[in-house]
Structures are given as C-alpha cells and as structure tokens.
Amino acid sequence: MQFIAQNLAPIMFAGLFVFLLLGFPVAFSLGACGLFFGFIGIELGVLPTSLLQALPLRIFGIMQNETLLAIPFFTLMGLILERSGMAEDLLDTIGQLFGPVRGGLAFAVIFVGALLAATTGVVAASVISMGLISLPIMLRYGYDRRLASGVIAASGTLAQIIPPSLVLIVLADQLGRSVGDMYKGAFIPGFVLTGMYAGYVVLIAIFKPKWVPALPLEARTIREDSGKAGLPSLLVLTILSTALAVTLGRNWARVVSWWRGETVTTVPTDETIVVAMCAGVMFAFIIALINKVTRLGLLSRMAERVTFVLIPPLLLIFLVLGTIFLGIATPTEGGAMGALGAIIMATVRGRLSMSLLKQALNATTKLSCFVVFILIGATIFSLSFQGVDGPRWVEHLLTALPGGQLGFLIVVNILIFLLAFFLDFFELSFIVVPLLAPVADKLGIDLVWFGVLLAVNMQTSFMHPPFGFALFYLRSVAPDKAYVDRVTRKQIAPVTTGQIYWGAVPFVIIQLAMVGLIIAFPGIVGHDTVEKVDLDKVKIEMPADMPGSGGSTDPLAPPADLQPGSAASNKAEADEQKKIDDLFKK
C-alpha cells in the first residue's frame, strides 16, 4: 500500500492505457480511470476527501467555454459545403485545367484538398468527397492505385493543419492560447505541406510517368469552338490578378496607415496574404462577370469556368479567415459567419433541402457531443492526476532528458507519433497535451509554436495503419469489388486495403519531414508574440519635483507644504475639525 501511495501518478497513467486497451470508449475510460484512482487516493490518504467537490465546477466551466462553440459552427459549415456539390465542381474544373499534364488529376486533388481544408476544416468531409468523385476518374485513366489512394487521404488530412481546423481549436483551448494565434501560426506551414505533397507528385511524374498519365484528349470536355484548351486567356487573367495582389500586398502597410490615421510600418504576413488574395480574386471575378454580361470574348470558356468555380470557396475563406486575421471577428464569430455563408451558398446553388440540413445538423450534434464527452472525461482524469502530483512527475520525467529543448522536442514527437497509431487527435489533445504544455512552457518553448508542431505530428494519426481514420474513410468509399466503368465500359479492378495502406506511407514520411522543418526553422510558424514581463523587476519611480513626491524617497509621502507640523497642515486639520463639529450640531 505504501508503494502504491508513493507511485500513484505513474500507476494511474499506466492504468489509463489498460482501460483503453480493454476496448471501452475513450470518454468513459478517462472518466472511469479518474474516479477509480481518485477513490483509491482518498482511501490511502493521498488525496483529500473534498477533491471531487471541484468536479461540478470544472464541468460547468467546460459548458461556459465560448471557444468550443467554434467546433459545431465549423463542422456544420463543412458538412453543408460537402453536400452542396462544391467539391464536385472544384474537382471537375481543376481536373480539366491540369488534365493535359502528367499527374494533373493528382495535382487537382491536392489543390482542391487545400481549398476544402480552408473552407470545411473537417477531414472526413474532404476525404469522402474526393474519394467518391476523383478516385473513379483516376482509376479510369490508369493511375497507380497506391498513389491515388495516398494523394486523396493525405490531401483530406490538410483540413487538420490549414485553418479553420478543429484540431487547432482544441489545441488552443488545451494550451491556454488564442485560437486566432494558432490559426496565424499554422497558416504558412499548412500551405508549405501542400507544396511538399505537390513536389512528391512532380517527382513521381518524372521518374514513374506510367503511374500518373495525362488525361486523353477525349476526356478534356471544357474546350473552345476551335478545339483549343483556352489556357492563354486564363494565364493572362492569372498574371494580372497576381500582379494586383502582389502590389496591394506590398503597399498594405500604407493602406492600413491611411485607414488608422497613424503610421504603421509592418503588418502580419498572414493578414497581407489573405487581403492580397481577396483583392486578386475580386479582380478576376469582376473581369469574368463583365465578359459574361457583355459577351466581349475577353476570356475563354476555361478561364470563365475556373473563375466562377473558384470564387465562392475563396470568398468564404476570406469571410472566415480574413475577418479573424484582420481582428474583425473572433474564431467563434468567424465560424458562425462561415456556417451562414455555406447555407447561403448551398441555397443559391439550389442544393439546400430540409433533408440535407437535418443530416448536417445531426452529424454536427454527434461530433460536438463526442468532443464534449471526451473533454468531460479528460477533466475527471486530470483532476485526480493533478491531485496525486501527476504533472510534477511528468515534469521531472521530461525535464531530466538530455539535450534541453531539442531533446524534449525529439522525445515528445516520437511519443506523439507512436501514440497516434492507437489514438486519434481528439484523444491525444485531451490526454497528452495537458501533460506536455507545462513542461514546454517551463523550458521556454512558445506554446503557439509548440501547438502547431503537435498539430502537424498529430496529422499522422489520420494516415498511418492500422487505425488511420482517413484510411478508414477512403476504404468506405473505394471500390472493394471489380466493376464496369460507365464511361470506358472496361472492367476496373478493386482497390485493396493493402494498396491504401502502402499508398499512405510516403505521405506520412512527408508529414514527419514537415515536423523536422518546423523544428529546424521555427520562423515557418509566424504569429504575433507578446514579450513576457517579469513583474518582480518592475520599478515605479517618481521625480523629486513632482507634486506629491514631497522631496522624499517614499512615493506615498505628502508634499512638503502638507508635512505634519507645518502651518498649512495645521490649518487643514482645523478646517476639517470645524466641519465635523458643524455636522454634530445639525
């Protein structure tokens, strides 16, 4: 009993994994483990009997947490967009755009995956949409099954790192940091990772061209009357829009200075990118609208189609992320506007129905309840774990590692990577991150940077076998039996589970390489840092000639003419006494 009492923290931590391995749901495993060891600690005299009285207050604190409101908003937005046909239009149009080059369909999947990530923030919606729409086309035209599966699953997981990601909301809550700061920090790493995916496809197109064939001529449906693809006008429009965006980006500080009426020398990079992108998109939209109304023939069919298909999601990105980055809206308010924007977009497209709305609301409620139940279970566990000095045990365990900050980061990332084989990102966020955050803060690691690093690492939990959820989502929509293609009338072989697993391996390696890049080049994660102030070193000094200083070193000393015993002081006392006497007489 004495051994158990002295080592209750590590025993409790090991007991949690026993509960999880027994197959109980994570939320109930966390709660049961916390209550079980809480009662043991009380019986052994390690914990006070009043410990569990704090539990109701903690649960009410979860209910009052406004940050978590962003989760149902972004989930509803993503589900409505996924069912409104936006992903289908994007994949069809971008696939036609990149079709003439090797790997064009894979590039389209990556590009659309990034756009869906920046609008939906839900991995399941992205993977299922692209699996249903693009996988049959890639199989039809001879893409390697492993590459096709890996590209779709990996592009869907971009929704975990590119804002407005649900993971970043949860991590911000657990790390005690602003969701807006987490979004700003993850903005550039998310698109760098997208570029790394595209770079891998480029290498495949060079060294394994048979794996990624170009679309045949008969499959390129968006063509001009002359038979040409109509790319030159799209190229000109892109160049003009980009030039306008870059010009505005370079002069954005001057615009902000004019707006505020004061000189502003620097503005955040993410804010500049979002504003410049919105300006370029609006310019392209105006040109395409003028071309369509006046029928001047300024743009080809391809240019017009691409412009009108890209405008809605890009404007929605600006509505959500732009307002957050510019400080106009909080993430919760941005999520509410995004959900409303998705409903309006689906209504305009004629895709919104009561059944679609019910399905989206039902799925949103389930996911939100899932998150809240895990958070309640994690709160019960953490209450007992803190009571037995668990955080101090973890801190001593991790701060004693050789190598300081670097050693800590290497061990933590290896631990997260291994745990991700068995736990998903919600479970990792609620169980492991609260234990790591205090140690990282004590070692002087910026917690926003640390959160983005963990988010990239947790992305692998969707990808690596055997429990990668993105692989499960893809398996649910990939053909498991041979079928006859409706276009070519050829028999298409099924996609096996082994092909899906092997296709994910290169992209898991790319994700780990991104983790190494963030550690090697911390500046990739950009956000506004607040300089810490040591309150013990703050001094307030008053000049000797300042009224109230009294020529004394005591900052609270009265002026010299009101020092005790002076004529002015005696007169003031007499006047005060006279007022008191008059009051008593009345």
Image (cartoon, grey):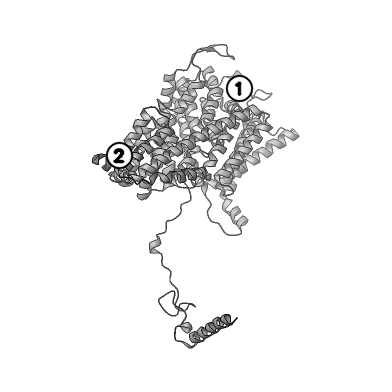
> What residue would you read off at disc 2?
10
Q: For mark 2, does the 10 Å Cα neighbourhood hold few (<14), some (14 to 19), or many (20 or more) residues?
A: some
Res. 84 in view:
no
Query: Which quadrant, please, contains the C terminus?
Result: bottom right
* Percent x, y of residue 531: 44, 56
Outermost residue on the front side: it is 585
Mark 2 and mark 1 residues within 8 Å of each other at the beta carbon: no
Q: How many marks?
A: 2
Query: Which quadrant, please, contains the N terminus?
Result: top left
Which residue sits at x=56%, y=25%?
A: 99
Check disc 1 and give the amino acid type.
Arg
Say which label, 2 or 1, has the lower sequence index: 2
Outermost residue on the right side: it is 294
* Percent x, y of residue 83: 60, 28
CA–CA distance in space, label 2 to label 1 = 61 Å
Q: Nearer the viewer, mark 2 or mark 1?
A: 2
Question: Can you tell which mark lies on residue 220?
Answer: 1
* Percent x, y of residue 356: 62, 28
Outermost residue on the bottom side: it is 567
Quarter location, residue 237: top right
Check disc 2 and give the amino acid type.
Pro
Q: What element carries label 1?
A: loop
Q: Which of 394 and 347 is in front in this view?
A: 394
Q: Nearer the viewer, residue 46 or 500?
A: 46
Q: Nearer the viewer, residue 44 or 286?
A: 44
Image check: 219 left or right of 58?
right
Q: For mark 1, does the 10 Å Cα neighbourhood hold few (<14), some (14 to 19), or many (20 or more) residues?
A: some
Q: Which of 26 and 439 is in front in this view?
A: 26
Question: Can you tell which mark lies on residue 494?
Answer: none
Res. 88 in view:
yes
Q: What element carries label 2?
A: helix
